[in-house]
Every structure is written in C-alpha cells, then in structure tokens.
Amino acid sequence: MTEDSTVWLDDHQQRVWRLWLEVTTTLPAVLNRQLSRDSQLSVQDFEVLVRLSETDGGEMRVVALAEHMGWERSRLSHHLTRMEKRHLVERRICCSDGRGAIIHLTDQGMEALKQAAPGHAALVRRVVFGGLDCGHLDDLEIILTRIRQGLINEEKTNSTDTD
C-alpha cells in the first residue's frame, strides 16, 4: 500500500476516536484512585469480587472467570495470587474433576466488596451517568451494544482464521 492510498479516519471519526481513547484511559484511572482510597482495591480486584459475588456459592472456575473478564488465564492466575495473599479469595480444587481450580470469595473479600461498592457506584453515577438523561442513556446502550457485537464478530473471525 502506498502512502497516498492509506485509508485514514475522516476528521469526525478521528475526533470521536481520540475522545474515546481519552475516556477509556482516564475512566479506569479515576475508578482505580477512588477504589484504592476507599477500600484498597483495584478495578480488577473489584471486578473479580463482583463476578464471584454474583454466583451461587461465591465461586467460579478460573477458566470461566478468565473468559468472563477477557483475560489470559496466566494474567488472571497472577492477579488471583495477589488477591489470595490479601485473603480476598481462595483457590480450591475442583472436586468433580480434580484438575481445574475454583476461586472462592472469602468473607474478607465480600466485606471489601461491600465497603467499596457504595463509593464506586456513586462515582460511576456521577461521572458516567451524571450528565445523561434517559434518552442519552438509551442511545449509549444502543451504541455500546453495537460496538460489543462488532467485537464479538471480530473475535469469531479471528478465531476461525487461526483454526
């Protein structure tokens, strides 16, 4: 492809894309500061705890948790090790097959989640939803759903390319 035939984003797409990058970079940093200050949790810790709290028995296989979070298993495993050292979660052997590990939400992890949730929800409500009316919220849901579907389609395409 020659330099002249390079297809760039148009000016409007470029403005929106850069705004998207700014928001997706800044928002996690703001959320991390608030969670760290209020509960000594990171956004990633919070997500693990939320996902576990929403399951029966507060536990989930590592493989399933990695899939839900969109993380590589090795990355999640290292993160869970750090969370274990803080007694937020514990690994258990899977009784049904003895191979996979199950991550269990500890009482201390549940307490950390309960401590963190109100401040986190208040910040999200203020920063993300504060300037939106119901129409904006509906539009945002439609837009994000379409983007997510595009990502799912891209993943399917890439997974069939490597098979």
Image (cartoon, grey):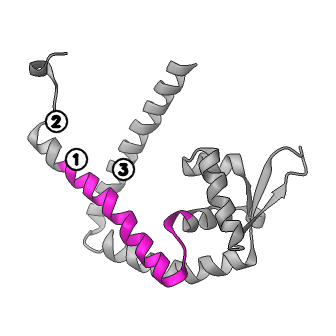
Is residue 27 inside the magenta stretch? yes
Residue that appears at 48% across and 26% down: 158
Residue density around tag 3, few if under 14, some if 14–19, many if 20 or more, within 10 Å: few
**Residue segment shown in magenta:** 16-44
Q: Quadrant of the C terminus?
A: top right
Mark 1–mark 3 Cα distance, whole angstroms, equals 14 Å
Q: Are marks 2 and 1 in contact (CB under 8 Å)?
A: yes
Instruction: Farthest residue to the top: give it.
Output: 1
Residue density around tag 2, few if under 14, some if 14–19, many if 20 or more, within 10 Å: few
Provide the residue designation for mark 1. 17
> What's the distance in space between the residues labelled 2 and 1, CA to CA?
9 Å
Residue 115 relative to residue 130: left or right: right
Q: Nearer the viewer, residue 55 or 161?
A: 161
* N-terminal label among 1 and 3: 1
Left or right of 3, for residue 122: right
Q: Earlier in the sequence, mark 3 or mark 2?
A: 2
Label 1 residue SS:
helix
| Residue 88 rendering spot, x and y as whole percentages | 69, 72
Mark 2, residue position = 9
**Cα–Cα gap, marks 3 and 2:** 20 Å
Q: Position of residue 162 (x, y in %)?
A: 54, 21
- Identified by mark 2, the residue type is Leu
Q: Secondary structure at mark 3?
A: helix
Q: Is residue 32 above or below residue 118?
A: above
Most common SS among magenta residues: helix
